Image (cartoon, rainbow, N blue to C red):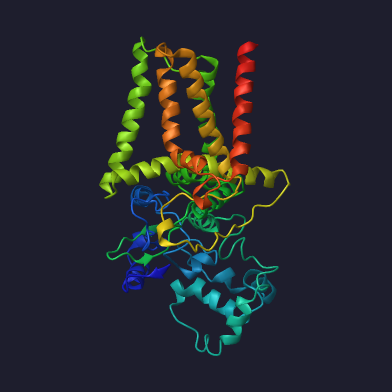
Amino acid sequence: MFANNPQVVLHAMCVFLNSKDDLEDIGYVQTPQCFYDGLKDDPFGNQLVVVFQYYSRGVMGLQGPLYNGTGCFHRRNVLYGQFPHHTTHFMNGKASEQELMKLFGYSKCFAKSAIYAFEETTHGYHPNGLFNDNLEAAKQVAGCGYEINTTWGSKIGWIYGSTTEDILTGLVIQTRGWRSIYVVLNPPAFLGCAASQLVASLTQQKRWVSGLLEILFSKHFPVFGTLFGKLQWKQCAAYLWLLTWGLRSIPELSYALLPPYCLITNSSFFPNMEERSISIPIFLFIIYNFQQLLLYKETGQSIRAWWNNQRMGRVNTMCAWLFGLGNVVLKFLGVREVVFEVTKKETYCEADLGHFMFDESAMFVPATSLLLLQLIALLMSFIRQAGRMRNTVLEVICSVWLVLCFWPFLKGIFVFGKGRYGLPFSTIYKSAALALLFVLLCQRTTVN
């Protein structure tokens, strides 16, 4: 990430220094994430153009956008735990040296600087010589052990306890009553690098979901911030929409298993074709996808970009989000801690960009299993009910839709063992075993 617009600092300072009452409680200025190397048509669905365009702009009418971890300017006193409209001396001017060390660490120079940041709204002056010879102080504060036995990470600075500490920090800031503002500049304020390979993109998604769920099931649960803090109800709902991403993997997995189950057991969960109510799921499907397509067209995206994001929505949910949820469950069971997974350095040639390349990661097993299961169910249905499929037409359409969503995995099966474009044999046989097990369980249910 680098600054792309030389005026970005000026725009942020104009917000902070504005004397209007409605801007005095602005805690941070957030700019949208833009990418200088974004692949054409967003093949991995990780540029989030529609999300930033509608979600971030939408919450501007509430308490402002969430902190995205980059492209942001903060007030110092906000990061030091101050509340809006603070008009008194820090701790009434009676803070002892031990209390200051507990809060800010053992650097006296930094503690004085932090106190000034607290009191600048009432004093408006800068102590003489505060930043003279501060190189040693900077070395102290930058030390790895400086925050030990202090409130750093709990009340001051970035809040620890989640691999998405940026979202958590923004949530804590807005729970204190601060607002944020969204600044969109032309040219873009900052430009960054987006993941250009499937494995890196899925690893990033898994890390996000793990961190978001850690926040959801912690003392920083947004509803608590509304009940006991100053987080607005609608802002709370905006956070909940984001934090519950990972939970969607369970119902989506269930719905993905339902069509093959019906095709295998010769049953149906949709109305019959003769019933008028059959139009309800059909129209819901058409209207939803048409509305999504309009969103992408309104943001200048192509139809191909819309389809890539729809497809990656299923891939992310069945691969990254499912494993992110599993990581959090294992953490709460005391089996393992959620770790910050660093994405691998990408050294692929230009010809590989945008292509699905696989490795032996277990993340690919659920999606491959679902794909094989859809194919088996479709085959069994065609063999059993050739010419007599009126009662399972929508189930067949659902399975075909999922096959299209996981089409890159189907191509990976046919070229397995042929470099990075093919699925590893270990992934295929594990997935095949799971798919066959599901088929056997379905048939056993039918017999019983």
Front position in the image: 165 or 59: 165
Q: Report if residue 402 is visible in the image.
A: yes
Looking at the image, which is closer to me, 331 or 182?
331
From the viewer's side, name the closer residue of 33 and 87.
33
The residue closer to the viewer here, 262 or 348, is: 348
Q: Residue at x 69, y 74 (%)?
A: 98
Residue 360 x %, y %: 60, 49
Residue at image location 56% in from the left, 52% down from the top: 207
Residue extending farthest right? 334
- Count of picture labels: 0
Residue that appears at 42% across and 29% down: 400
Q: Position of residue 288 (x, y in %)?
A: 34, 33
Q: Quadrant of the C terminus?
A: top right
The vertical placement of 378 against 223, above or below, is above
- Residue 268 can be seen, yes or no: no
Direction from residue 277 to residue 197 in the image, left or right: right
Q: Quadrant of the N terminus?
A: bottom left
Q: Position of residue 406 (x, y in %)?
A: 46, 38
